[in-house]
Image: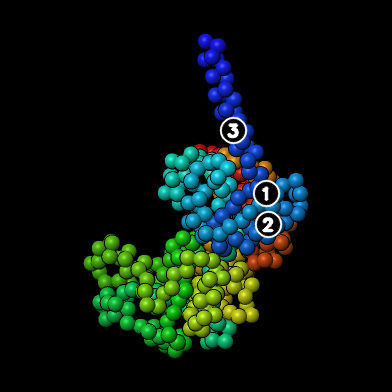
Amino acid sequence: MKTALLTSAAAIALIAGSTAAFAQSRDTIQIAGSSTVLPFASIVAEEFGAVFPEFNTPVVGSGGTGGGLAQFCEGTGDNTIDIANASRHIRDGEREICTAAGVTDIREIQFGFDGIVFASAASGPDFALTPVQVYKAIAAQVVVDGELVDNPYTNWSEVDASLPDQPIALAVPGSNHGTREVFQERVVGAGCEEAGLPEGLSEDAVEAACTTYRQDVVTEISGDYTETLARLNSDANTVGVFGLSFYEQNTDTLKVATVNGVVPSKQSVATGEYPVSRPLFFYVKGQHIGVIPGIEDYVAFFLSEAISGEGGTLEAAGLIPQPADKTAEVLAAFEAGPTQ
């Protein structure tokens, strides 16, 4: 009996020790995800480390929205990340994966806006694009004389006489990026709908016609925007898809296209006049709050007026701030904890 009690006590001590080990084995916030959010989160992490010396500077990685959320949903514990940066909402399927892995307290933080732009070499011709033109340039099949055929266009001017007489070449984010989803929905999908497809196509055929890109002129970029920029630098004919904030950091080498006649800018995105924009997020693993030091402080610091508000540090870096009352609502929801 005494042996059994000692064995039980040892087991309890071991379990308690394991819990304590998780609490103490990592003392640095780990973040991964969106390449659009990456520069903003990196700035906040450095500022946070300077303002709060009692905490280590958070480690911020990339990997794209999908990649970051995949890491986030691997489970809980010190070998999983605490925060996933995202340039879109988490999907229902991703939530289900999280739940299955025990990640049940997911707290969404929306902190501002960004636009998605088309940019090309500063020395090249000007582009004034519409969604239907982009769709006709990069779709694997397009409608010609009422029939859906393999895309015959080689130059932009063949798509529309108003566009430059330049070979079609487009570098777009890979499917691991949230930017890709917004690009597909707001540009290619909208262009496909406007162009119109032959009647009688099945639902699957319509989806394929609107979502399948050419392999001869489209390069899918799985890395961050620096990889897209490198592609443009190596081929002056390439038009790249970027976040507005990244473009604004590289105006010495890039020029931006209008979309539907609107020049992308902080003002045109904030007012909704520019048609290709989206909110930006990061997702916090609530079960790590109080275990990994500094998470609550990091969130409050990120959402502070001095950092992400009007005239704040991130606006100077290209973020389009959201209204202060929206930020207050987001912070209150975070502090209130999970509702599900």
> What amino acid type is highlighted by mark number 1?
Tyr
For label 3, the crowd category at 10 Å Cα-Cα, with few meaning under 14, some 14 to 19 and many 20 or more, is some
Which of the two marks, 3 or 2, is nearer to us in this view? 3
Q: Position of residue 50 (x, y in %)?
A: 75, 54
The residue shown at (57%, 76%) is 263
What residue is rendered at 57% in x and 22% in y? 10
Q: Are marks 2 and 1 in contact (CB under 8 Å)?
A: yes
Instruction: Residue 77 in the image: state x and y as whole percent.
Output: 55, 41
**Residue 75 visible in the displayed image:** yes
Q: How many C-alpha atoms fall within 10 Å of the one at disc 1: few (<14), some, or many (≥20)?
A: many
Residue 133 quadrant = bottom left
Using the image, determine if residue 261 lies above or below residue 97. Answer: below
Q: CA distance from mark 1 to mark 3?
A: 23 Å
Name the residue at the front extreme: 3
Q: Would you name the residue on which mark 2 appears?
A: 44
Name the residue rendered at 56%, 48% in the picture. Answer: 81
Q: CA distance from mark 3 to mark 2?
A: 30 Å
Image side of residue 234 versus residue 136, left or right? right
At numbered mark 1, what does the secondary structure look like: helix, strand or loop? helix
Graded by Cα atoms within 10 Å as few (under 14), some (14 to 19) or many (20 or more), the crowding at tag 2 reads many
Residue 298: mark: 1
User: Which residue is under mark 3?
Assistant: 19
Viewer-nearest of discs 1 and 3: 3
Mark 2 and mark 1 lie on one chain; the one further toward the N terminus is: 2
Residue 132 shows up from this direction: no
User: Given the image, on which type of amino acid does mark 2 rest?
Assistant: Val
Query: Mark 2 falls on what kind of element?
Result: helix
Residue 220, placed above or below residue 168:
above
Residue for point 51% across, 66% down: 223
Closer to the camera in the image, 265 or 91: 91
Determine which quarter of the picture holds residue 317. Answer: bottom right
